[in-house]
Amino acid sequence: MFSPAPGLPVSAHSVLDVVPQPAGQSAAAALRETVEVAQAADDLGFRRFWLAEHHGVRGFGSASPAVLAAVLAARTDRIRLGSGGILLGNHQPLLVAEQFAALAAAYPSRVDLGVSEGAVSAPCTAAALGWSGDARETFPQRLDELCRFLRDGLPGRVPVGDVRLTLAGLPPPVFVLANRPATAQLAAVRGLPVFLTASEATVAAAAAYRDTFEPTGPTGKPYLGVSVGIVAADTDEEALNRLAEYVRVKHRLSTASLRATPAELLELLAPPLTGRERGRAERLLDDPGHIVGSRSTVASGLATLAASTGADEIMLTPLAYDGLVRSSILRTVAAALTRAIRTVPRSAPHFVATA
């Protein structure tokens, strides 16, 4: 049984980003803001900055985690970059292995590969990706194939089916992102580290992972992370206002017509909050997958999450479309966890993108 942890330092917290792109914002501006958020996370001492994979979701620009990780790695100094996670049902394992092996060669000890059994929900997007509809059923096989390519497809090792990786060096660590106990166990029997999505099933999934872990993987011992949505501000009231803003924009973007023009979207997104949106925001306050509040409220919530799950690491998704607000959320969290915030002048050039 794990020992309850009172809390975790900033260095044991990470960030998950979806490259938010509000209505009317250019792709270049959205990417520039994400670079700046990653730089803030790097300066604050967060451990990782991962990009989710989303396709066909209005307002989210994270369709290519490997490409985005390369962009961010070139413009940060210390933080680890990676995917959170690659949807293996959308890709051939060899292609994923080649992409992240090349990234790991370019940025040694700074690249992670997080993978997920999740699938694309929109039928038209799934068809465009060539998704067959059996992502969950084929995930174990694809995961094993991916790990074999990264482990055995290296120079000096026996190739996998006569295939060797190019630009391969020390392979990046593979993490499994899980939202149910069965997936956590799948990672455990392979000796792989896991990130669980915070929910009512997290404690049970964490126990299942530890109970079935086989020390056959690269670390030889369990490694458990938990991901949670976060909204932090100077006061609880300000945090609630930020949550309401996020819910309003996300809900209206998801329900808007696919043919809506930018001008129509901007008009659609105008305040105030509807009763349904207010109810949606209020429900999130009781959702274990979200922590919302002031510095002290957030610190207490993160400590409780760490203690209840025995997590080695907590990954935060700052819930805001504005890059300045996402950076502000991370600074508030860092200040809640420690007073020794590390800031070192960066050597990487600042990313400049035109609108």
Image (tube, grey):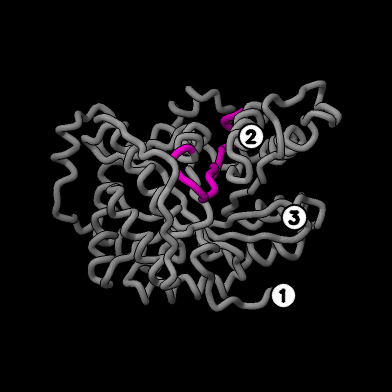
323 lies above or below 4: above
SS class, disc 1: loop
Q: Quadrant of residue 275?
A: bottom left
Residue 74's place in the image compared with 78, above or below, is: above
Earlier-in-chain disc, 2 versus 1: 1
First in sequence: mark 1 or mark 3?
A: 1
Mark 2: amino acid: Ala
Q: Amino acid at mark 1?
A: Met
Is disc 1 surrounded by few (<14), some (14 to 19) or many (20+) residues within 10 Å?
A: few
In which quadrant is the C terminus drawn?
top left
Residue 85 among magenta residues: yes
Give the x, y percent position of residue 25: 24, 36
Q: Is residue 3 above or below residue 76?
A: below
Residue at x-position 58% and y-position 45%: 110
Determine which residue is flagged by label 2: 105
Task: Classify mark 3: residues with Cα within 10 Å, few (<14), some (14-19) or many (20+).
Answer: few
Q: Nearer the viewer, mark 1 or mark 3?
A: 3
Q: For the residue marked with disc 3, what is the amino acid?
A: Thr
Q: Position of residue 80 (x, y in %)?
A: 54, 48
Q: Which residues are magenta?
A: 74-91
- On the rendered structure, is 247 left or right of 220? left
Is residue 324 found left or right of 206 in the rendered image?
Answer: left
Instruction: Locate residue 20, reporting x and y percent.
Output: 34, 42
Per the image, the residue denoted by label 3 is 219
Which residue is disc 1 drawn over?
A: 1
Q: Is residue 114 visible?
A: no
